[in-house]
Image: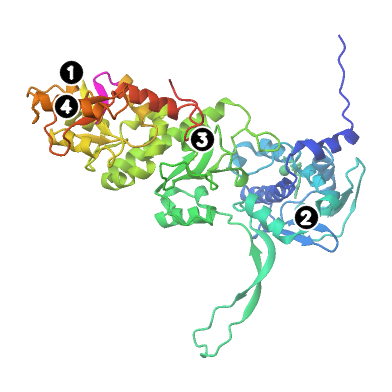
Protein backbone atom coordinates (compact mmCIF):
# COMPACT_ATOMS: atom_id res chain seq x y z
CA UNK A 1 0.00 0.00 0.00
CA UNK A 2 1.18 3.48 -0.70
CA UNK A 3 -0.16 6.58 0.87
CA UNK A 4 0.52 10.10 -0.25
CA UNK A 5 -0.62 13.61 -0.34
CA UNK A 6 -2.70 14.93 -3.18
CA UNK A 7 -1.02 18.00 -4.46
CA UNK A 8 -3.55 20.70 -5.03
CA UNK A 9 -1.91 23.37 -7.06
CA UNK A 10 -3.51 26.74 -6.69
CA UNK A 11 -2.97 27.48 -10.34
CA UNK A 12 -5.57 24.87 -11.00
CA UNK A 13 -7.97 25.64 -8.25
CA UNK A 14 -8.66 29.31 -9.06
CA UNK A 15 -10.21 28.74 -12.45
CA UNK A 16 -12.25 25.95 -10.88
CA UNK A 17 -13.62 28.19 -8.17
CA UNK A 18 -14.31 30.86 -10.69
CA UNK A 19 -16.14 28.59 -13.05
CA UNK A 20 -17.88 25.91 -11.06
CA UNK A 21 -18.08 26.58 -7.36
CA UNK A 22 -20.86 29.09 -7.62
CA UNK A 23 -23.37 28.77 -10.37
CA UNK A 24 -24.42 32.34 -9.97
CA UNK A 25 -21.84 35.10 -10.33
CA UNK A 26 -24.02 37.65 -8.57
CA UNK A 27 -23.53 35.99 -5.19
CA UNK A 28 -20.04 37.56 -4.89
CA UNK A 29 -21.74 40.54 -3.31
CA UNK A 30 -23.65 38.42 -0.83
CA UNK A 31 -20.39 36.72 0.19
CA UNK A 32 -18.39 39.92 0.61
CA UNK A 33 -21.15 41.69 2.52
CA UNK A 34 -21.47 38.55 4.67
CA UNK A 35 -17.77 38.72 5.48
CA UNK A 36 -18.10 42.41 6.34
CA UNK A 37 -21.05 41.54 8.56
CA UNK A 38 -19.14 38.71 10.24
CA UNK A 39 -16.20 41.03 10.91
CA UNK A 40 -18.60 43.49 12.56
CA UNK A 41 -20.44 40.83 14.57
CA UNK A 42 -17.16 39.32 15.76
CA UNK A 43 -16.05 42.67 17.07
CA UNK A 44 -19.41 43.11 18.73
CA UNK A 45 -19.03 39.74 20.39
CA UNK A 46 -15.51 40.48 21.61
CA UNK A 47 -16.63 43.77 23.14
CA UNK A 48 -19.68 42.08 24.67
CA UNK A 49 -17.62 39.45 26.45
CA UNK A 50 -15.10 42.05 27.51
CA UNK A 51 -12.23 40.64 25.50
CA UNK A 52 -11.37 44.02 24.06
CA UNK A 53 -11.81 47.53 25.33
CA UNK A 54 -12.26 49.14 21.90
CA UNK A 55 -15.32 51.27 21.32
CA UNK A 56 -17.85 49.32 19.25
CA UNK A 57 -19.95 52.37 18.34
CA UNK A 58 -22.51 52.11 15.53
CA UNK A 59 -20.58 50.46 12.74
CA UNK A 60 -22.05 50.32 9.24
CA UNK A 61 -21.02 48.63 6.01
CA UNK A 62 -20.72 50.66 2.85
CA UNK A 63 -20.98 49.49 -0.74
CA UNK A 64 -19.80 51.99 -3.32
CA UNK A 65 -19.35 51.92 -7.08
CA UNK A 66 -16.72 53.87 -8.98
CA UNK A 67 -17.96 53.45 -12.51
CA UNK A 68 -15.16 55.42 -14.19
CA UNK A 69 -12.43 53.37 -12.57
CA UNK A 70 -14.50 50.17 -12.86
CA UNK A 71 -14.26 49.44 -9.17
CA UNK A 72 -16.59 48.33 -6.40
CA UNK A 73 -15.69 49.07 -2.76
CA UNK A 74 -17.04 47.11 0.19
CA UNK A 75 -16.01 48.74 3.43
CA UNK A 76 -16.67 47.67 7.00
CA UNK A 77 -15.79 48.91 10.48
CA UNK A 78 -15.37 45.42 11.88
CA UNK A 79 -12.45 43.79 13.58
CA UNK A 80 -10.03 44.01 10.62
CA UNK A 81 -7.01 41.77 10.05
CA UNK A 82 -3.37 41.91 10.96
CA UNK A 83 -0.72 40.89 8.40
CA UNK A 84 -0.56 37.45 10.02
CA UNK A 85 -4.30 37.07 9.83
CA UNK A 86 -4.37 37.93 6.15
CA UNK A 87 -1.78 35.19 5.62
CA UNK A 88 -3.86 32.80 7.64
CA UNK A 89 -7.41 33.54 6.53
CA UNK A 90 -7.08 34.90 3.02
CA UNK A 91 -4.06 33.12 1.63
CA UNK A 92 -5.29 29.75 2.80
CA UNK A 93 -8.10 28.79 0.50
CA UNK A 94 -10.85 26.81 2.25
CA UNK A 95 -9.79 27.83 5.74
CA UNK A 96 -12.73 29.49 7.41
CA UNK A 97 -12.02 32.15 9.99
CA UNK A 98 -15.72 32.12 10.81
CA UNK A 99 -15.64 28.45 11.74
CA UNK A 100 -12.50 29.00 13.77
CA UNK A 101 -14.12 31.86 15.66
CA UNK A 102 -17.24 29.85 16.47
CA UNK A 103 -15.07 26.95 17.60
CA UNK A 104 -12.96 29.19 19.82
CA UNK A 105 -15.83 30.98 21.53
CA UNK A 106 -18.22 28.04 21.39
CA UNK A 107 -21.18 28.57 23.69
CA UNK A 108 -20.86 32.29 24.11
CA UNK A 109 -20.78 32.83 20.33
CA UNK A 110 -23.39 30.34 19.25
CA UNK A 111 -26.06 33.01 18.94
CA UNK A 112 -23.74 35.64 17.51
CA UNK A 113 -25.19 35.23 14.03
CA UNK A 114 -21.81 34.63 12.35
CA UNK A 115 -22.45 33.60 8.76
CA UNK A 116 -19.25 32.19 7.22
CA UNK A 117 -18.74 28.49 7.00
CA UNK A 118 -16.77 26.99 4.17
CA UNK A 119 -13.82 29.36 3.88
CA UNK A 120 -14.45 29.88 0.20
CA UNK A 121 -16.77 32.85 0.01
CA UNK A 122 -14.05 35.45 -0.36
CA UNK A 123 -12.77 33.89 -3.57
CA UNK A 124 -16.12 34.36 -5.24
CA UNK A 125 -14.83 37.92 -5.76
CA UNK A 126 -12.74 36.57 -8.63
CA UNK A 127 -15.86 35.59 -10.53
CA UNK A 128 -16.39 39.25 -11.38
CA UNK A 129 -13.03 40.90 -10.62
CA UNK A 130 -9.72 40.62 -12.45
CA UNK A 131 -7.90 42.04 -9.44
CA UNK A 132 -8.84 42.25 -5.76
CA UNK A 133 -7.32 44.48 -3.10
CA UNK A 134 -7.75 44.29 0.64
CA UNK A 135 -6.86 47.24 2.82
CA UNK A 136 -7.34 46.34 6.45
CA UNK A 137 -6.52 47.50 9.94
CA UNK A 138 -7.06 45.27 12.92
CA UNK A 139 -8.74 46.39 16.14
CA UNK A 140 -5.52 45.18 17.75
CA UNK A 141 -2.82 47.84 17.84
CA UNK A 142 -1.00 46.72 14.69
CA UNK A 143 -0.20 48.46 11.40
CA UNK A 144 -2.64 48.33 8.51
CA UNK A 145 -1.83 46.11 5.53
CA UNK A 146 -2.55 46.08 1.83
CA UNK A 147 -3.04 42.79 -0.04
CA UNK A 148 -3.31 42.61 -3.81
CA UNK A 149 -4.01 39.61 -6.00
CA UNK A 150 -4.91 39.36 -9.67
CA UNK A 151 -6.41 35.89 -9.51
CA UNK A 152 -3.10 34.13 -10.04
CA UNK A 153 -1.60 32.43 -7.00
CA UNK A 154 0.80 35.34 -6.53
CA UNK A 155 -0.18 38.06 -4.16
CA UNK A 156 1.56 41.05 -2.61
CA UNK A 157 1.26 42.10 1.00
CA UNK A 158 2.65 45.39 2.24
CA UNK A 159 2.02 48.01 4.93
CA UNK A 160 -0.77 50.49 4.29
CA UNK A 161 -1.61 53.88 5.73
CA UNK A 162 -5.23 53.16 6.70
CA UNK A 163 -5.83 54.66 10.13
CA UNK A 164 -9.39 53.56 10.87
CA UNK A 165 -10.34 50.11 12.09
CA UNK A 166 -11.90 47.71 9.61
CA UNK A 167 -11.52 46.33 6.11
CA UNK A 168 -11.97 47.67 2.63
CA UNK A 169 -12.30 45.24 -0.27
CA UNK A 170 -11.67 46.76 -3.70
CA UNK A 171 -12.83 44.84 -6.74
CA UNK A 172 -11.42 45.71 -10.16
CA UNK A 173 -14.36 44.57 -12.24
CA UNK A 174 -13.46 42.38 -15.22
CA UNK A 175 -14.53 43.27 -18.75
CA UNK A 176 -17.10 40.47 -18.87
CA UNK A 177 -18.78 41.65 -15.66
CA UNK A 178 -19.26 45.35 -16.28
CA UNK A 179 -23.01 45.02 -15.60
CA UNK A 180 -22.11 45.00 -11.91
CA UNK A 181 -21.00 48.61 -12.17
CA UNK A 182 -24.62 49.64 -12.74
CA UNK A 183 -26.11 51.24 -9.68
CA UNK A 184 -29.53 49.66 -10.31
CA UNK A 185 -28.01 46.19 -10.58
CA UNK A 186 -26.14 46.48 -7.29
CA UNK A 187 -29.15 47.96 -5.52
CA UNK A 188 -31.29 45.04 -6.73
CA UNK A 189 -28.71 42.54 -5.49
CA UNK A 190 -28.46 44.22 -2.10
CA UNK A 191 -32.26 44.22 -1.85
CA UNK A 192 -32.39 40.57 -2.78
CA UNK A 193 -29.69 39.08 -0.58
CA UNK A 194 -29.01 41.63 2.14
CA UNK A 195 -32.37 43.21 2.83
CA UNK A 196 -32.56 41.86 6.38
CA UNK A 197 -28.89 41.49 7.30
CA UNK A 198 -28.03 42.53 10.85
CA UNK A 199 -25.55 45.37 10.21
CA UNK A 200 -26.76 48.55 8.44
CA UNK A 201 -25.60 48.69 4.82
CA UNK A 202 -25.13 52.06 3.20
CA UNK A 203 -25.50 52.41 -0.56
CA UNK A 204 -25.37 56.03 -1.67
CA UNK A 205 -27.04 59.02 -0.12
CA UNK A 206 -30.28 60.93 -0.55
CA UNK A 207 -31.64 64.25 0.62
CA UNK A 208 -34.18 64.66 3.37
CA UNK A 209 -35.94 67.70 4.76
CA UNK A 210 -35.05 68.72 8.28
CA UNK A 211 -38.09 68.93 10.58
CA UNK A 212 -39.91 72.26 10.39
CA UNK A 213 -39.37 74.27 13.61
CA UNK A 214 -42.54 74.92 15.59
CA UNK A 215 -42.27 78.70 15.33
CA UNK A 216 -41.57 78.60 11.57
CA UNK A 217 -43.21 81.29 9.43
CA UNK A 218 -45.80 80.10 6.87
CA UNK A 219 -43.43 80.64 3.96
CA UNK A 220 -40.65 78.64 5.66
CA UNK A 221 -38.47 76.66 3.26
CA UNK A 222 -37.49 73.35 4.86
CA UNK A 223 -33.78 72.80 5.06
CA UNK A 224 -32.39 69.91 3.01
CA UNK A 225 -29.67 67.61 4.30
CA UNK A 226 -27.83 64.75 2.70
CA UNK A 227 -28.21 61.44 4.57
CA UNK A 228 -26.93 57.91 4.07
CA UNK A 229 -29.25 55.55 2.22
CA UNK A 230 -29.46 52.41 4.32
CA UNK A 231 -30.57 49.55 2.14
CA UNK A 232 -31.54 47.00 4.80
CA UNK A 233 -33.68 46.50 7.87
CA UNK A 234 -31.24 45.05 10.43
CA UNK A 235 -34.00 43.98 12.84
CA UNK A 236 -36.67 42.14 10.86
CA UNK A 237 -39.77 40.97 12.69
CA UNK A 238 -38.88 37.29 12.69
CA UNK A 239 -35.80 37.93 14.83
CA UNK A 240 -37.95 39.45 17.59
CA UNK A 241 -40.01 37.81 20.30
CA UNK A 242 -43.68 37.22 19.43
CA UNK A 243 -44.62 39.00 22.67
CA UNK A 244 -42.96 42.17 21.39
CA UNK A 245 -44.94 42.27 18.15
CA UNK A 246 -48.45 43.49 17.41
CA UNK A 247 -50.72 42.34 14.59
CA UNK A 248 -49.82 45.59 12.82
CA UNK A 249 -46.11 44.70 13.05
CA UNK A 250 -46.80 41.34 11.41
CA UNK A 251 -48.79 42.99 8.67
CA UNK A 252 -46.09 45.62 8.09
CA UNK A 253 -43.46 42.96 7.84
CA UNK A 254 -45.56 41.04 5.30
CA UNK A 255 -45.65 44.09 3.07
CA UNK A 256 -41.97 44.76 3.60
CA UNK A 257 -41.27 41.21 2.46
CA UNK A 258 -43.60 41.43 -0.53
CA UNK A 259 -43.74 45.09 -1.57
CA UNK A 260 -46.10 44.33 -4.47
CA UNK A 261 -48.65 42.38 -2.40
CA UNK A 262 -51.66 44.46 -1.48
CA UNK A 263 -53.75 41.70 0.08
CA UNK A 264 -53.70 41.30 3.82
CA UNK A 265 -52.70 37.81 4.98
CA UNK A 266 -55.37 35.83 6.85
CA UNK A 267 -53.14 35.02 9.79
CA UNK A 268 -49.53 34.36 10.68
CA UNK A 269 -47.52 31.76 12.48
CA UNK A 270 -44.36 32.80 14.29
CA UNK A 271 -41.83 29.97 14.36
CA UNK A 272 -39.25 29.95 17.11
CA UNK A 273 -37.28 26.92 18.16
CA UNK A 274 -33.73 26.37 19.36
CA UNK A 275 -33.71 22.69 20.11
CA UNK A 276 -32.92 20.21 18.57
CA UNK A 277 -32.26 22.64 15.75
CA UNK A 278 -32.31 26.37 15.43
CA UNK A 279 -35.10 27.91 13.44
CA UNK A 280 -37.02 31.14 13.42
CA UNK A 281 -39.45 32.59 10.95
CA UNK A 282 -42.92 33.84 10.24
CA UNK A 283 -45.36 32.08 7.93
CA UNK A 284 -48.42 33.80 6.52
CA UNK A 285 -51.60 32.24 5.20
CA UNK A 286 -52.53 34.30 2.16
CA UNK A 287 -56.05 34.45 0.77
CA UNK A 288 -56.38 31.59 -1.63
CA UNK A 289 -58.91 30.52 -4.14
CA UNK A 290 -59.33 26.88 -5.02
CA UNK A 291 -57.59 27.54 -8.31
CA UNK A 292 -53.87 27.10 -8.46
CA UNK A 293 -52.31 30.50 -8.35
CA UNK A 294 -49.10 31.00 -10.19
CA UNK A 295 -47.24 32.29 -7.25
CA UNK A 296 -44.34 34.66 -7.52
CA UNK A 297 -44.25 35.56 -3.84
CA UNK A 298 -42.96 32.47 -2.14
CA UNK A 299 -41.59 31.53 1.25
CA UNK A 300 -38.02 32.78 1.49
CA UNK A 301 -35.23 30.87 3.13
CA UNK A 302 -32.57 32.76 5.08
CA UNK A 303 -29.48 31.71 6.94
CA UNK A 304 -28.55 34.12 9.71
CA UNK A 305 -30.55 36.85 7.98
CA UNK A 306 -28.80 36.29 4.63
CA UNK A 307 -31.20 35.45 1.82
CA UNK A 308 -30.53 32.01 0.37
CA UNK A 309 -33.39 30.99 -1.92
CA UNK A 310 -37.12 30.91 -2.38
CA UNK A 311 -37.05 27.24 -3.23
CA UNK A 312 -37.95 25.65 0.09
CA UNK A 313 -38.81 22.25 -1.34
CA UNK A 314 -38.00 19.58 1.25
CA UNK A 315 -37.76 22.05 4.14
CA UNK A 316 -41.40 23.02 4.10
CA UNK A 317 -43.90 20.21 3.57
CA UNK A 318 -45.35 20.42 0.09
CA UNK A 319 -48.84 21.40 1.17
CA UNK A 320 -47.45 24.49 2.89
CA UNK A 321 -45.46 25.79 -0.05
CA UNK A 322 -48.52 27.88 -0.93
CA UNK A 323 -47.88 29.95 2.18
CA UNK A 324 -45.70 33.05 2.30
CA UNK A 325 -43.14 34.32 4.77
CA UNK A 326 -39.59 33.58 5.88
CA UNK A 327 -37.72 30.74 7.46
CA UNK A 328 -34.29 31.38 8.93
CA UNK A 329 -32.09 28.59 10.14
CA UNK A 330 -28.33 28.25 10.45
CA UNK A 331 -28.90 24.50 10.74
CA UNK A 332 -30.28 23.84 7.30
CA UNK A 333 -27.50 21.99 5.51
CA UNK A 334 -26.79 23.77 2.27
CA UNK A 335 -23.93 23.18 -0.10
CA UNK A 336 -21.11 25.65 -0.67
CA UNK A 337 -23.06 27.74 -3.12
CA UNK A 338 -25.93 27.65 -0.62
CA UNK A 339 -28.46 27.13 -3.34
CA UNK A 340 -28.92 23.40 -2.92
CA UNK A 341 -30.21 21.51 0.02
CA UNK A 342 -28.19 18.52 1.10
CA UNK A 343 -30.21 15.46 2.02
CA UNK A 344 -30.09 15.21 5.76
CA UNK A 345 -32.13 13.85 8.66
CA UNK A 346 -32.30 17.31 10.19
CA UNK A 347 -34.25 18.55 7.21
CA UNK A 348 -37.02 16.04 7.78
CA UNK A 349 -37.16 17.11 11.42
CA UNK A 350 -37.53 20.72 10.39
CA UNK A 351 -40.32 19.85 7.99
CA UNK A 352 -42.15 17.88 10.70
CA UNK A 353 -41.73 20.72 13.14
CA UNK A 354 -43.26 23.18 10.71
CA UNK A 355 -46.20 20.84 10.09
CA UNK A 356 -46.79 20.52 13.82
CA UNK A 357 -46.54 24.25 14.45
CA UNK A 358 -48.99 25.03 11.69
CA UNK A 359 -51.45 22.44 13.02
CA UNK A 360 -51.13 23.80 16.57
CA UNK A 361 -51.71 27.34 15.39
CA UNK A 362 -54.80 26.33 13.42
CA UNK A 363 -56.12 24.56 16.45
CA UNK A 364 -55.68 27.59 18.67
CA UNK A 365 -57.16 29.96 16.09
CA UNK A 366 -60.16 27.68 15.90
CA UNK A 367 -60.70 27.45 19.62
CA UNK A 368 -59.98 31.10 20.33
CA UNK A 369 -62.35 32.52 17.75
CA UNK A 370 -64.39 29.91 15.99
CA UNK A 371 -66.58 32.35 14.12
CA UNK A 372 -63.59 34.08 12.57
CA UNK A 373 -62.06 30.73 11.68
CA UNK A 374 -65.27 29.64 9.96
CA UNK A 375 -65.24 32.81 7.91
CA UNK A 376 -61.73 32.07 6.72
CA UNK A 377 -62.46 28.44 6.02
CA UNK A 378 -63.08 28.88 2.33
CA UNK A 379 -59.73 30.55 1.85
CA UNK A 380 -57.70 27.95 3.66
CA UNK A 381 -59.53 24.69 3.09
CA UNK A 382 -57.66 23.69 -0.04
CA UNK A 383 -54.31 23.83 1.77
CA UNK A 384 -55.64 21.99 4.80
CA UNK A 385 -57.41 19.30 2.84
CA UNK A 386 -54.31 18.72 0.80
CA UNK A 387 -52.29 18.58 4.01
CA UNK A 388 -54.58 15.90 5.40
CA UNK A 389 -53.93 13.81 2.33
CA UNK A 390 -50.21 14.28 2.04
CA UNK A 391 -48.91 14.53 5.63
CA UNK A 392 -49.95 11.82 8.11
CA UNK A 393 -48.73 14.02 10.97
CA UNK A 394 -51.05 16.78 9.89
CA UNK A 395 -53.94 14.40 9.35
CA UNK A 396 -53.62 13.20 12.94
CA UNK A 397 -54.17 16.71 14.24
CA UNK A 398 -56.69 17.88 11.66
CA UNK A 399 -59.72 16.54 13.52
CA UNK A 400 -59.43 19.46 15.90
CA UNK A 401 -59.96 22.19 13.31
CA UNK A 402 -60.92 20.86 9.89
CA UNK A 403 -64.49 21.84 9.08
CA UNK A 404 -67.33 20.36 7.10
CA UNK A 405 -69.70 23.18 6.20
CA UNK A 406 -73.31 22.43 5.30
CA UNK A 407 -75.09 23.97 2.34
CA UNK A 408 -76.75 26.22 4.93
CA UNK A 409 -73.42 27.54 6.25
CA UNK A 410 -73.31 25.57 9.43
CA UNK A 411 -69.78 24.42 10.19
CA UNK A 412 -69.17 21.05 11.78
CA UNK A 413 -66.00 19.36 12.86
CA UNK A 414 -65.99 15.69 11.93
CA UNK A 415 -67.04 14.69 15.45
CA UNK A 416 -69.83 17.25 15.50
CA UNK A 417 -70.98 16.10 12.10
CA UNK A 418 -71.18 12.52 13.30
CA UNK A 419 -73.30 13.61 16.23
CA UNK A 420 -75.61 15.61 14.01
CA UNK A 421 -76.14 12.70 11.64
CA UNK A 422 -76.62 9.99 14.23
CA UNK A 423 -80.39 10.39 14.84
CA UNK A 424 -81.50 10.64 11.24
CA UNK A 425 -78.88 9.54 8.74
CA UNK A 426 -77.80 5.95 9.22
CA UNK A 427 -77.95 3.12 6.73
CA UNK A 428 -79.02 -0.44 7.33
CA UNK A 429 -75.50 -1.43 8.41
CA UNK A 430 -75.52 1.26 11.04
CA UNK A 431 -73.10 3.50 9.18
CA UNK A 432 -73.55 7.27 9.23
CA UNK A 433 -74.39 8.60 5.79
CA UNK A 434 -72.77 11.93 4.99
CA UNK A 435 -74.78 13.45 2.17
CA UNK A 436 -72.73 16.00 0.34
CA UNK A 437 -73.02 18.34 -2.58
CA UNK A 438 -70.12 19.46 -4.71
CA UNK A 439 -71.90 22.32 -6.43
CA UNK A 440 -74.71 24.16 -4.75
CA UNK A 441 -76.22 25.59 -7.92
CA UNK A 442 -75.95 22.58 -10.20
CA UNK A 443 -77.22 20.16 -7.56
CA UNK A 444 -79.88 22.46 -6.24
CA UNK A 445 -82.81 20.09 -6.94
CA UNK A 446 -81.11 17.16 -5.25
CA UNK A 447 -80.15 19.29 -2.30
CA UNK A 448 -83.65 20.51 -1.64
CA UNK A 449 -85.04 16.99 -2.08
CA UNK A 450 -82.66 15.81 0.62
CA UNK A 451 -83.40 18.76 2.86
CA UNK A 452 -87.12 18.15 2.53
CA UNK A 453 -86.47 14.80 4.10
CA UNK A 454 -84.74 16.50 6.98
CA UNK A 455 -81.23 15.47 5.95
CA UNK A 456 -78.11 17.54 6.48
CA UNK A 457 -76.19 18.19 3.26
CA UNK A 458 -72.54 19.04 3.54
CA UNK A 459 -70.85 21.18 0.90
CA UNK A 460 -67.56 19.67 -0.23
CA UNK A 461 -66.50 21.53 -3.29
CA UNK A 462 -62.73 21.52 -3.56
CA UNK A 463 -61.20 19.53 -6.40
CA UNK A 464 -59.49 16.98 -4.16
CA UNK A 465 -62.58 16.07 -2.18
CA UNK A 466 -63.01 12.63 -3.73
CA UNK A 467 -59.56 11.69 -2.36
CA UNK A 468 -60.35 13.17 1.01
CA UNK A 469 -63.60 11.32 1.53
CA UNK A 470 -61.99 8.10 0.40
CA UNK A 471 -59.44 8.60 3.17
CA UNK A 472 -62.05 9.56 5.77
CA UNK A 473 -64.09 6.48 4.93
CA UNK A 474 -61.12 4.18 5.20
CA UNK A 475 -60.29 5.60 8.62
CA UNK A 476 -63.85 5.69 9.93
CA UNK A 477 -65.58 2.42 9.18
CA UNK A 478 -68.86 3.78 10.49
CA UNK A 479 -68.90 6.57 7.93
CA UNK A 480 -69.99 6.63 4.31
CA UNK A 481 -70.09 9.61 1.96
CA UNK A 482 -72.78 9.83 -0.67
CA UNK A 483 -73.24 12.70 -3.07
CA UNK A 484 -76.80 14.05 -3.20
CA UNK A 485 -77.22 13.06 -6.82
CA UNK A 486 -76.21 9.44 -6.31
CA UNK A 487 -78.87 6.86 -6.93
CA UNK A 488 -78.36 5.24 -3.58
CA UNK A 489 -79.33 8.27 -1.55
CA UNK A 490 -82.83 7.06 -0.99
CA UNK A 491 -81.94 3.41 -0.59
CA UNK A 492 -79.04 4.07 1.72
CA UNK A 493 -80.69 5.90 4.48
CA UNK A 494 -82.71 3.62 6.65
CA UNK A 495 -86.13 5.14 6.86
CA UNK A 496 -89.29 3.41 7.94
CA UNK A 497 -91.78 5.39 5.92
CA UNK A 498 -92.92 4.12 2.52
CA UNK A 499 -91.91 6.08 -0.51
CA UNK A 500 -94.92 7.77 -1.96
CA UNK A 501 -95.10 8.99 -5.51
CA UNK A 502 -97.73 11.24 -6.89
CA UNK A 503 -97.73 9.39 -10.17
CA UNK A 504 -99.63 6.27 -11.15
CA UNK A 505 -97.62 3.21 -12.24
CA UNK A 506 -98.59 3.78 -15.85
CA UNK A 507 -97.52 7.42 -15.73
CA UNK A 508 -94.25 6.39 -14.17
CA UNK A 509 -93.48 3.90 -16.90
CA UNK A 510 -94.15 6.41 -19.63
CA UNK A 511 -92.04 9.08 -18.00
CA UNK A 512 -89.21 6.69 -17.38
CA UNK A 513 -89.12 5.56 -20.98
CA UNK A 514 -89.14 9.14 -22.17
CA UNK A 515 -86.28 10.19 -19.91
CA UNK A 516 -84.18 7.15 -20.59
CA UNK A 517 -84.32 7.98 -24.25
CA UNK A 518 -82.32 11.16 -23.64
CA UNK A 519 -79.89 10.32 -20.81
CA UNK A 520 -76.78 8.20 -21.48
CA UNK A 521 -77.62 4.52 -21.52
CA UNK A 522 -75.07 3.33 -19.01
CA UNK A 523 -74.13 4.54 -15.60
CA UNK A 524 -77.27 6.53 -14.87
CA UNK A 525 -80.52 5.67 -13.20
CA UNK A 526 -83.86 7.38 -13.52
CA UNK A 527 -85.65 7.51 -10.21
CA UNK A 528 -89.30 8.19 -9.92
CA UNK A 529 -90.00 6.49 -6.65
CA UNK A 530 -89.57 8.26 -3.40
CA UNK A 531 -89.82 11.64 -4.96
CA UNK A 532 -92.00 13.45 -2.51
CA UNK A 533 -90.37 16.77 -3.06
CA UNK A 534 -92.16 19.50 -4.91
CA UNK A 535 -89.00 20.84 -6.45
CA UNK A 536 -88.12 17.76 -8.50
CA UNK A 537 -90.62 15.35 -10.01
CA UNK A 538 -87.92 12.82 -10.82
CA UNK A 539 -84.16 12.44 -10.54
CA UNK A 540 -81.41 11.24 -12.80
CA UNK A 541 -78.62 9.79 -10.71
CA UNK A 542 -75.31 8.07 -11.02
CA UNK A 543 -73.88 5.60 -8.52
CA UNK A 544 -71.53 7.23 -6.01
CA UNK A 545 -68.64 4.84 -6.54
CA UNK A 546 -68.60 5.19 -10.34
CA UNK A 547 -68.47 8.92 -10.25
CA UNK A 548 -65.92 9.00 -7.47
CA UNK A 549 -63.52 6.65 -9.24
CA UNK A 550 -63.66 8.83 -12.30
CA UNK A 551 -63.00 11.99 -10.30
CA UNK A 552 -60.09 10.46 -8.46
CA UNK A 553 -58.41 9.39 -11.64
CA UNK A 554 -58.80 12.96 -12.89
CA UNK A 555 -57.24 14.67 -9.88
CA UNK A 556 -54.38 12.30 -9.19
CA UNK A 557 -51.49 11.78 -11.59
CA UNK A 558 -50.81 14.29 -14.31
CA UNK A 559 -49.80 17.01 -11.90
CA UNK A 560 -53.22 18.07 -10.68
CA UNK A 561 -53.49 21.15 -8.60
CA UNK A 562 -50.41 20.81 -6.49
CA UNK A 563 -48.62 18.36 -8.72
CA UNK A 564 -50.46 15.74 -6.75
CA UNK A 565 -48.49 12.70 -7.66
CA UNK A 566 -47.82 11.48 -4.17
CA UNK A 567 -51.35 10.62 -3.26
CA UNK A 568 -51.94 7.47 -1.36
CA UNK A 569 -53.86 5.19 -3.67
P1 LIG B 1 -15.81 32.13 5.62
O1 LIG B 1 -16.54 33.43 5.66
O2 LIG B 1 -16.64 30.98 5.24
O3 LIG B 1 -15.01 31.89 6.88
P2 LIG B 1 -14.37 33.41 3.45
O4 LIG B 1 -13.62 32.83 2.32
O5 LIG B 1 -15.60 34.17 3.08
O6 LIG B 1 -14.72 32.24 4.45
O7 LIG B 1 -13.42 34.33 4.27
C1 LIG B 1 -12.25 33.76 4.83
C2 LIG B 1 -11.84 34.48 6.08
O8 LIG B 1 -11.24 35.72 5.78
C3 LIG B 1 -12.96 34.83 7.01
O9 LIG B 1 -13.34 33.76 7.81
C4 LIG B 1 -12.33 35.94 7.83
O10 LIG B 1 -11.51 35.42 8.84
C5 LIG B 1 -11.46 36.64 6.81
N1 LIG B 1 -12.15 37.82 6.27
C6 LIG B 1 -12.76 37.90 5.08
N2 LIG B 1 -13.32 39.12 4.91
C7 LIG B 1 -13.05 39.82 6.05
C8 LIG B 1 -13.37 41.15 6.50
N3 LIG B 1 -14.08 41.99 5.76
N4 LIG B 1 -12.91 41.52 7.72
C9 LIG B 1 -12.20 40.67 8.49
N5 LIG B 1 -11.89 39.40 8.11
C10 LIG B 1 -12.30 38.99 6.91
MG1 LIG C 1 -17.51 34.32 4.09
Rounded to the nearest angstrom, the CA distance separating label 1 from label 2 is: 73 Å
Q: Which mark is in front, 2 or 4?
A: 4
Above or below 548: residue 227: below
Disc 3 element: loop
Q: Nearer the viewer, residue 474 or 300?
A: 474
- Report, in whole angstroms, how far the alpha carbon at label 3 lies from the one at label 1: 41 Å
Please tell me how crowded label 3 is: few (under 14), some (14-19), or many (20+) other residues with Cα within 10 Å.
many
Number of marks: 4
Residue holding disc 3: 316
Pick the residue in front: 448 or 108.
448
Of discs 3 and 1, which sits in the foreground? 1
Which numbered mark, 4 or 1, is in the foreground of this view? 4
As measured in the structure, the alpha-carbon distance from the residue carrying label 2 to the one carrying label 3 is: 35 Å
User: SS class of the residue under badge 4?
Assistant: helix
Mark number, residue 430: 1
Within-10-Å neighbours for mark 2: few <14, some 14–19, many 20+: some
Q: Quadrant of the C terminus?
A: top left
Residue that label 2 marks: 179
Q: Residue at x 22, y 29 (%)?
A: 514
Identify the residue at image location x=25%, y=26%.
Answer: 516
Specify the label residue 510 is tagged with: 4
The segment highlighted magenta reads 476-484
Ligand 1 is in which quadrant of the figure?
top right
Q: Earlier in the sequence, mark 2 or mark 4?
A: 2
Nearer to the camera, 57 or 283: 283
Q: Position of residue 281 (x, y in %)?
A: 50, 44
Sequence order check: which comes first, mark 3 or mark 1?
3
The residue depicted at 61 percent of the width and 52 percent of the height is 198
Question: Residue 16, image x and y in percent?
Answer: 83, 35
Amino acid sequence: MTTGKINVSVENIFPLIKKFLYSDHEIFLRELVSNATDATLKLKHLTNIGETAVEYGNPIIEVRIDKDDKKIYITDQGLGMTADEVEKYINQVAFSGAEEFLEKYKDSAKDSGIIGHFGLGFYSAFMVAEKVEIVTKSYKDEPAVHWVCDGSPEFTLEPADKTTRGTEIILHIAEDSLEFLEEGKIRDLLKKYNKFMPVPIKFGTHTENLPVPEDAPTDYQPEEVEVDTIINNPNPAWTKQPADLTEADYSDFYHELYPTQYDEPLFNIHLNVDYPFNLTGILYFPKMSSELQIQKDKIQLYQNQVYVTDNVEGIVPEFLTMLRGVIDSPDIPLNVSRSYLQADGAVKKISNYITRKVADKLKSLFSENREDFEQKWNDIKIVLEYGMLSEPKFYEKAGAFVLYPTVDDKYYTLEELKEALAPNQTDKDGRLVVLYASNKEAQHGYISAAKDKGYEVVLLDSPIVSHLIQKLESDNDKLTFVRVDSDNVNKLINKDEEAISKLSDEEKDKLKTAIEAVVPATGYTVQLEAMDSNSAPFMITQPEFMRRMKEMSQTSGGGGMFGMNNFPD
